[in-house]
Amino acid sequence: MPDLKSVLAWSAVAAGVAIAAERRLSKSLADPDSPVLDWELVRRTAYSRCGGDGLAAVEQAGLDYDPLVAELVPMLAEACHTDAQQASFGRVRVVGRHGFIDQNLAMMRRLLRPIEEQQAGWGAMRPSPLMRVPSSLYVGTLIGLMARRVLGQYDPVLTFTPKGVPPGPDDEPLPQPALLIVEPNVRRFSESSELPLDSLRRWLMLHELTHAWQFELHPWLREYLISLIGELSRLPGGGRNLGLEELVQAARSLRPQLAIVGRLQAVMAVLEGHGNYVMREAGRRHFPDFDTLDQAFHRRHEQPQPAERLLLWISGIAFKLQQYQQGERFLRAVEAAAGQPGLDRIWTGAEALPGWSEVRRPEQWLLRMSLGPPAAEQTTGHPQAAPA
């Protein structure tokens, strides 16, 4: 029988969603040209679901991370076989949960801008104003949940503007890529897991600095992802106003779009899998408490709260975590078969990136790259999900 407190809590959430939807509905229906999402409603919902900003724990923490960057960059360079001078990067921003939410909303708006600019061409398939409210509430709830859990994040600043679309009057200059640390979550995890704060920060920073290495030392990677985003945002019929029948016909030829989604999945699996791979390789060599940290992160991902587990499953994030594990398995199979030269080959250009089927079957990628079949699978344990 369900716990009474849980029933009351979920009833209160449902009531809150209904009240918020009712208050926003008339305004949304009155503005058919409004964006795909009500961004202010998304922000307010995320703020209300994140459990407080925790800004007091952030104010003095920024100074603690700069020395860590200087300490970790040589370890990262060693693990990636890169000259330490080439890896001299790492702009760290220590934020609270509200700062994390604001950063991710800005990221989402940059990526969704081409879609919002082309809404006029959607015709009968244009999003209903009635759905804007529940969609905004859902996205806000999801971002609020992630703001409570995420420890760190690297923002490479991806953006796509369709040709012929000038910058909007409210557009701001693009920010610089940044590595975000959500300090309230780091400290809470340190306390709940009884991990030394300095050790936890060092472990987390090594993973996120690996993402900085991926993008800052390989500029083609950002351009490749932007090109995929651009292809996904193209509308059937070149953006002209299509009727429902024409859109149904266009939907039947979406196989190329689905192939692009597969390529994006593969890239994300490799990026996160590589972050895990470097973190473990360097951690084993340099962190005396490596095993304790690794086990604590494993427990963190294996034991989410029931409500969080449900939302992670509905949103697809749980599936993404499995993809990241698959990405690390792919990298370890490549290393077993072709050593460091095989790992280096991945970062030579977009044509060397694996497809999703190749991520799941590394022998296909090795044969395509003329590197031979993979060695027998290692038995040193199963890769776990990314810490962030």
Image (cartoon, helix red, strand yellow):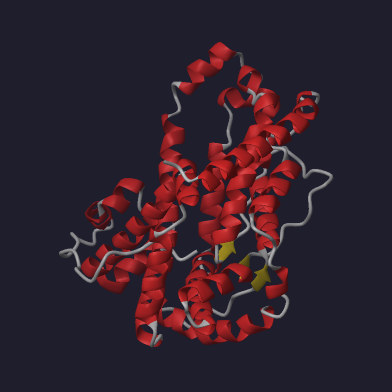
Q: Is residue 78 above or below residue 329?
A: below
Q: Is residue 191 above or below residue 141?
A: below
Quarter of the picture containing the N terminus is top left
Q: Residue shown at 24%/58% (left/top)?
A: 370
Q: Residue shown at 47%/79% (left/top)?
A: 195
Q: Nearer the viewer, residue 9 or 103?
A: 9
Q: Is residue 112 left or right of residue 293?
A: right
Q: Is residue 117 visible?
A: no
Residue at the far right: name it: 169
Q: Residue shown at 47%/82% (left/top)?
A: 83
Q: Is residue 345 above or below residue 143?
A: below
Q: Nearer the viewer, residue 191 or 73?
A: 191
Give residue 284's position: percent from left, percent from top. 35, 81
Give residue 165's position: percent from left, percent from top. 73, 38
Q: Is residue 187 visible?
A: yes
Residue at the far left: name it: 376
Give residue 156's position: percent from left, percent from top. 59, 60
Q: Is residue 118 left or right of residue 315?
A: right
Q: Nearer the viewer, residue 320 or 244?
A: 320
Give residue 267's position: percent from left, percent from top. 43, 53
Q: Is residue 251 above or below residue 266?
A: above
Q: Is residue 286 left or right of residue 187?
A: left
Q: Residue shown at 45%/57% (left/top)?
A: 304
